[in-house]
Structures are given as C-alpha cells and as structure tokens.
Image: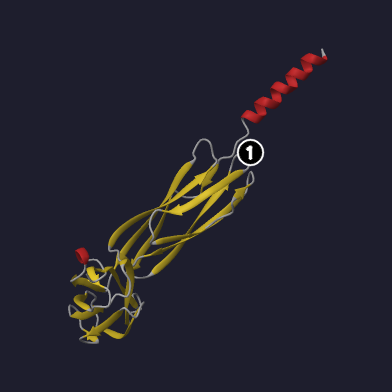
Amino acid sequence: MKRIYFFSALASFLAALAFSQPKLSLDKPEVDLGTIYGGVKKTGTFTLKNIGNDTLRIISVRPTCGCTTVKQPKAFLLPGESDVAEFEFNSAGYRGKVEKHVNINTNDPTSQYIDVKILADVREILQPVNGTINGTSMLFFNNVIVGNKTTQTVGLKNVSNMPIVVIGDSVSSSELALKINTHTLRPNDTLSIQITLQPQKTGSAYEHCYILTNHKNQPVVEIQVKYFGIKEN
C-alpha cells in the first residue's frame, strides 16, 4: 500500500512539474507614438508580465534598428511579477509613416520570440528637396580621399504656413563645415546649405549637421552625413 501511495505521489509531482512553466504577457502588441517632427526623439513604454507559474527569464529585448534604443527590463520575473521596458525612437532621417520593432526573447516555451511594433508619423517643417538621398535628410559622400575637402549643397524647404528663422547651426565633428545662404525663410522658401567634408579616417562613418530654428515643433533639423574615406594612391 505504501508503494502505491509513493508512486501516486511521484506521478502527481511529475505532472505538476510538467505543467510548471513561465508565460509572457504584453500589455500591448504595438505602441503608436503619434505625430513626431523630424529629428525629435520620443519615448514610449510597454509592460512585460509573467502570467505563468514558473520564473520567466528575459533573455534579450532588442530593437531591430539603430534609430531605437531600449532600457532593459529585469532579467527575471517571478510568477505574477511585471516590469516596464522603456524605449526611445529617434526620428532623424525618416519621413511619413514609420514602423519599427523591438524583439523580445524569453524562456516562455510557447512563445520564445515575440515583438512589439512601434508606429510613428514623422513630419517636417523644413523638408529636403535636393542633394540628399531619396528626399530624406541623409547625405552621402562616396570615396573621399582622407585629408581632402569636398562640398555638396542641399536644400531644405519651408513647408509650414509661417516664417521660420534659422538661429544657428552645429556639426558633430571638425570634419564637417556648414555655410548657409539665408537665416529667414518665408513659406515655400528654400534654405541652401553647403556642407564641406574633410575626412580624417578611412572607411565608412556617420556624422551629423544640425540646423537650429525658432519653430517650437522642430527646433532642431538634423542632416545625417555618411561618408567613405579612402587613402590617396
């Protein structure tokens, strides 16, 4: 009789063990950031909760694009425990409807990989009209000899219904220099910007130019500069 009780208890324990597992629940499958003006960074959050009956391990929470960063949540969630993951989306270089993703990897056996969709509508008051790549705020210098100077001109059009004053500019590196032809733009006027690059290193690199305005929605307009530096033969 004792042997029967032993095997019955063992079977019950193994059955309970088999059904003991973590389970991830998200409070929302997507986060809509709404309207963002180009160059503006905006944060959002989503909540992870363990609705299973065993410890949930958060192996990784990673964005699929360098435009998004994530503050990592707890590495382990006990049954019933939750934590908030905060992310930041940088709208520089984007226009129109944008969709990005944050991938989540856990030890949930039924859903090991899951993602959160991030949505945004990126608008501009100074819209690239020439010189940049496909009308985005990105400029590309290809095969520039290290130490040599080369210049490209880009245009930013005032697509708002009010005058915009350019109050300054800055660059991320001494490799770049800016020359701007005017500082007050009426609606539909275009700002002409000469961007001079003098690379100091070989290979692919990113730098940034910043146009500072008096517009409350887009006080900083960013132009991303990508270049490939080469040695002189």
The residue nearer to you, when weighing 14 against 66, is 66
Outermost residue, top side: 1
Q: Is residue 136 above or below residue 166?
A: above
Q: Is residue 76 above or below residue 11?
A: below
Image quarter of residue 79: top right
Residue type for callout 1? Asn
Q: Quadrant of the image for the N terminus? A: top right
Residue at the (22%, 71%) spot, across then down: 128
The residue nearer to you, when weighing 150 against 172, is 150
How far across and how far down the image is residue 27, in percent? 50, 49
Q: Which residue is mark 1?
A: 53
Q: Is residue 49 left or right of residue 41?
A: right
Image quarter of residue 163: bottom left
What kind of colouring is applied to the model shown?
secondary structure
The residue nearer to you, when weighing 231 against 66, is 231
Q: Is residue 142 above or below residue 22?
A: below
How far across and how far down the image is residue 190, in percent? 18, 79
Q: Secondary structure at mark 1?
A: loop
Residue at the (57%, 48%) spot, across then down: 49
